[in-house]
Image: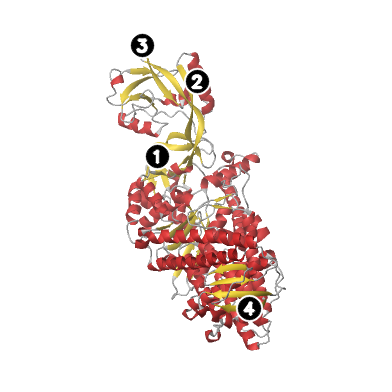
């Protein structure tokens, strides 16, 4: 057995342990074909930078599940990988190159992509080192990257098949355009924020010189692309001008007045300018009326030649100059300041420009309908919490076609080629044979296109005979934040259903965001971000994992605080000290933990093993329900309160005594309980549990592959739980009295215990050694007919009243006040219980066991209340 330091030191405990696990190949699936498979694929972090606390939260939950299932005998696979993150990574590398005075366009595509691969290799190495610090039991032999050959093959197959099925098409549509990154964005890559803006009210004169109409717009710079002004059909105000022509201010072009259902007659003047190339609604109006589409901007957000003298100006500078000219030429009626919601690029932060562009799209409705249909079937995806299923269904019910092409160089190149001579389009998994006549589409696919295939492409698909695909797909659980349902979860579901005919995972376990102590979202601008690696350096990975798991309620946000981290470290130190005590008190020839002989149990043994059974049952149930926070509370209460504060303290009586047989039994019981505690805790705290388990007599090479605790029916003992509970209440009550009157344990005191039932006397009689040790009485009287002393400290517990005659220390008035306060507390408890039991809804719907428990509590409170009232009267009579 190894000597353990007097104090828990996470740096020493964790040093070298991860490499040992890797060297021993403990992270690979067992390969036992008789075992049930269990798999989780890691949500692939972007190779844009280091992991943050959200990643740590994700992976701590995933690794806990994998370690738990591995110990339960499952053939468990935790598959690692990373995402190329097209826009984000290219933006990072471009920024780095700009700082060096370089430009990707000058470098050329091939040289630039090589730079991005170098970036990827650097940050992939950083991420893997962070995974190791977190203790993630990942099977690195199966590691994947969204741009590796196997995944690229899967991406090409999916694109081509969807194209051949008519579910991918190319066309001109209004898309979200990022002028900074010069690429298209999908709707969910756009963040809407309130900006200060204005309604610019402009005169549009009639071509016949008969006056003007007033048009209000927030984007006057787009007026160069106006091709009509619309009114609502049947609007009586404008029926006489429909069909007339207007002169576009500054430009001089004639445009018609049309009727269209898009116009809301109640909004503004009821007249709307139509710019088909710069607004999604105007685009639809233009299609209905066969209007020309005039794009007035360049890719970088500057005005093009359609803007005349404003060509080359930035869109916002052009706006200022145009408004100034409109005012000078008498077209500007007024400027009305407003605050309005404006789309911004999630990646670059610049204001998004709705813009006509030829892009590739996925036709979403048929795919979304499959998801909605599947959610009504037995093989649906289960959401935890289930309220987020509604989020998925709501989005899938009103989904738009997905723009999947991106004007980037880093990513999966679109497998489409255009014939240089004929203009013909070829889409295929491989390039055309006469390649010199063809030019490949220069765009790449949206990052989420490849990420959507992650659960099955990582398993070897499209090779459906792949051993991993057949064995581990569908996966069991996806653990991720609720903020990624649209981006990723929904896309994995519809792609998986379409291509594998199966859901990608059985359960989606959603957590919230990690906020700072004030409840604010962590961000660079606030400077409140926390590096999980810094936390590990200070407290250890086990403490961070305990905080993340213990603070987890499905779907809820959590707040990080160093106070919570201190508590986590203290808990581990408590386990460390308890383990050290047990190990130090074992004989030199101690054997590994083995099933104890229940026939020789005393009350404390029966109680702690019953409590262990309860803890195993509850933690197993709660883990299976993904209620990690509740499971953590069960573990904490059992380890800190039941085992450390009570059973170890009680065991010291035997360990310090002369009865060698009793001492041996206690040693065997202690090592069994400790062994079970370490196994229960291992999925959450892998490092410290391994260190402690290997420091005691053990069977096996690692606790990681030891069996997870199970219930042993022979340990169930409700009577022992009740009797020990009574004994603990007696001890706590006397200890509290000692504290109140400042009577140290070294001073012996008289103790009188008046029992409600004589049957409870045996509890104290049979455990007199514990009573002597913990209460240190000068005299001890236990009966049902004790005459209460006139002056004494009093405690009323369930089943008894306790009196400690301390005449010289007790102030009768203070004692009466204390008892009256207790009387009020018990009265409120009785009232609450009565109300609950008189509630017809509660009685009709609550399980019988719950109702009986409430009745028992009521009877207990009423009994205690009667005892308190009796004692108050006795104290008053003594005056």
Residue 243 higher or lower than 494, as above or below = above
Instruction: Tell me which label, 4 or 3, sits earlier in the chain.
Output: 3
**Tags 3 and 2 touching, CB below 8 Å:** no
Residue 462 position in % (x across, y down): 41, 60
Instruction: Tell me which label, 1 or 2, sits earlier in the chain.
Output: 2
User: Residue sitting at 35 percent across and 27 percent down?
Assistant: 266
Closer mark to the observer between disc 1 and disc 2 = 2
Residue 260 position in % (x across, y down): 31, 28
Q: Which mark is residue 323?
A: 2
Closer mark to the observer between disc 3 and disc 1 = 3
In this figure, which residue is indicated by the disc labeled 1?
Answer: 421
- Give the Cα separation between the discs numbered 1 and 2: 46 Å
SS under mark 4: strand
> Mark 3, residues whose alpha carbon is within 10 Å: few (<14), some, or many (≥20)?
few
Q: Say how the picture is coloured.
A: secondary structure
In this figure, which residue is indicated by the disc labeled 4?
Answer: 780
Residue 661 higher or lower than 674, as above or below = below
SS under mark 1: loop
- Give the Cα separation between the discs numbered 4 and 3: 113 Å
**Tags 1 and 2 touching, CB below 8 Å:** no
SS under mark 2: helix
């Amino acid at each position: 057995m190894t000597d353990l330091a007097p104090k828990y030191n996470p740096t020493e405990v964790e040093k070298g342990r991860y490499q040992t696990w890797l060297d021993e190949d403990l992270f690979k699936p067992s390969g036992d074909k008789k075992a049930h498979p269990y798999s989780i694929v890691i949500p692939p972090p972007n190779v844009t930078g280091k992991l943050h606390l959200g990643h740590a939260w994700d992976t701590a939950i995933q690794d806990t599940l994998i370690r738990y299932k591995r110990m339960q005998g499952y053939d468990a696979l935790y598959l690692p990988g990373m995402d190329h993150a097209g826009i984000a990574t290219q933006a990072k590398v471009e920024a780095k190159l700009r700082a060096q005075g370089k430009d990707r366009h000058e470098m050329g595509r091939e040289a630039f992509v090589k730079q991005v691969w170098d970036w990827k290799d650097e940050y992939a190495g950083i991420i893997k080192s962070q995974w190791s610090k977190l203790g993630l039991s990942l099977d690195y032999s199966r590691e994947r990257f969204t741009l590796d050959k196997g995944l690229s093959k899967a991406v090409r197959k999916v694109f081509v098949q969807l194209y051949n099925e008519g579910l991918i098409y190319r066309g001109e549509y209004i898309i979200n355009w990022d002028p900074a990154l010069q690429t298209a964005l999908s709707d969910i890559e756009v963040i809407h924020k309130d900006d200060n803006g204005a309604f610019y009210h402009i005169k549009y004169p009639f071509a016949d010189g008969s006056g003007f109409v007033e048009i209000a717009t927030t984007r006057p710079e787009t007026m160069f692309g106006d091709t009509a002004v619309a009114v609502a059909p049947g609007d009586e105000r404008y029926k006489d001008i429909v069909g007339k022509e207007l002169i576009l201010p500054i430009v001089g072009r004639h445009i018609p007045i049309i009727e269209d259902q898009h116009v809301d007659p109640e909004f503004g003047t009821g007249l709307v300018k139509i710019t088909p190339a710069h607004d999604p609604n105007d685009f639809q109006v233009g299609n209905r009326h066969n209007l020309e589409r005039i794009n007035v901007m360049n890719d970088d957000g500057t005005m093009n030649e359609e803007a005349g003298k404003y060509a080359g100006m930035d869109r916002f500078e052009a706006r200022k100059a145009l408004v100034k000219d409109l005012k000078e030429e008498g077209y500007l009626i007024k400027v009305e300041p407003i605050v309005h919601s404006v789309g911004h690029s999630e990646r670059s932060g610049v204001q998004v420009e709705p813009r006509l562009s030829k892009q590739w799209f996925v036709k979403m409705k048929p795919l979304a309908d499959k998801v909605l249909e599947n959610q009504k079937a037995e093989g649906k995806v289960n959401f935890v919490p289930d309220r987020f299923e509604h989020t998925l269904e709501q989005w899938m019910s009103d989904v738009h076609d997905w723009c999947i092409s991106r004007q980037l160089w880093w990513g999966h190149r679109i497998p489409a080629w255009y014939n240089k001579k004929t203009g013909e389009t070829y889409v295929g998994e491989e390039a055309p044979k006469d390649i010199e006549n063809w030019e490949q589409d220069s765009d790449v696919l949206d990052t989420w296109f490849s990420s959507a295939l992650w659960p099955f492409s990582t398993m070897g698909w499209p090779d459906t005979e792949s051993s991993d695909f057949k064995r581990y797909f569908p996966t069991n659980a996806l653990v991720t934040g609720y903020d990624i349902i649209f981006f990723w979860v929904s896309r994995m579901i519809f792609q998986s259903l379409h291509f594998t005919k199966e859901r990608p995972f059985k359960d989606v376990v959603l957590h919230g965001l990690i906020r700072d102590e004030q409840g604010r979202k962590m961000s660079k601008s606030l400077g409140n971000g926390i590096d999980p690696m810094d936390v590990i350096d200070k407290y250890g990975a086990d403490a961070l994992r305990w905080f993340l798991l213990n603070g987890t309620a499905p779907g809820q946000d959590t707040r990080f605080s160093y106070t919570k981290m201190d508590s986590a470290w203290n808990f581990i130190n408590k386990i460390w000290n308890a383990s050290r005590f047990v190990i130090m008190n074992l004989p030199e020839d101690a054997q590994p933990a083995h099933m104890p002989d229940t026939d020789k149990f005393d009350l404390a043994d029966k109680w702690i093993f019953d409590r262990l059974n309860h803890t195993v049952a509850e933690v197993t149930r709660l883990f299976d329900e993904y209620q990690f926070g509740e499971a953590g509370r069960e573990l904490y209460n059992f380890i800190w309160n039941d085992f450390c504060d009570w059973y170890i303290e009680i065991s010291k009586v035997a360990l310090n005594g002369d009865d060698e047989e009793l001492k041996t039994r206690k040693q065997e019981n202690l090592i069994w309980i400790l062994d079970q505690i370490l196994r229960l805790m291992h999925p959450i705290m892998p490092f410290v549990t391994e260190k402690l388990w290997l420091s005691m007599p053990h069977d096996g090479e690692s606790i990681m592959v030891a069996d997870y605790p199970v219930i042993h029916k022979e340990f169930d003992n409700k009577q022992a739980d009740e009797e020990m509970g009574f004994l603990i209440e007696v001890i706590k009550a006397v200890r509290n009295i000692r504290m109140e009157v400042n009577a140290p344990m070294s001073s012996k005191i008289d103790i009188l215990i008046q029992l409600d039932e004589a049957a409870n006397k045996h509890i104290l009689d049979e455990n007199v050694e514990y009573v002597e040790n913990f209460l240190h009485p000068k005299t001890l009287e236990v009966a049902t007919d004790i005459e209460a002393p006139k002056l004494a400290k009093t405690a009323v517990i369930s089943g008894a009243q306790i009196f400690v005659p301390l005449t010289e220390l007790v102030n009768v008035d203070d004692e009466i006040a204390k008892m009256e306060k207790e009387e009020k507390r018990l009265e409120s408890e009785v009232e609450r219980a009565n109300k609950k039991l008189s509630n017809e809804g509660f009685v009709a719907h609550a399980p019988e066991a719950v109702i009986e428990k409430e009745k028992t509590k009521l009877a207990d409170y009423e009994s205690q209340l009667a005892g308190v009232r009796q004692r108050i009267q006795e104290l008053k009579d003594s005056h």
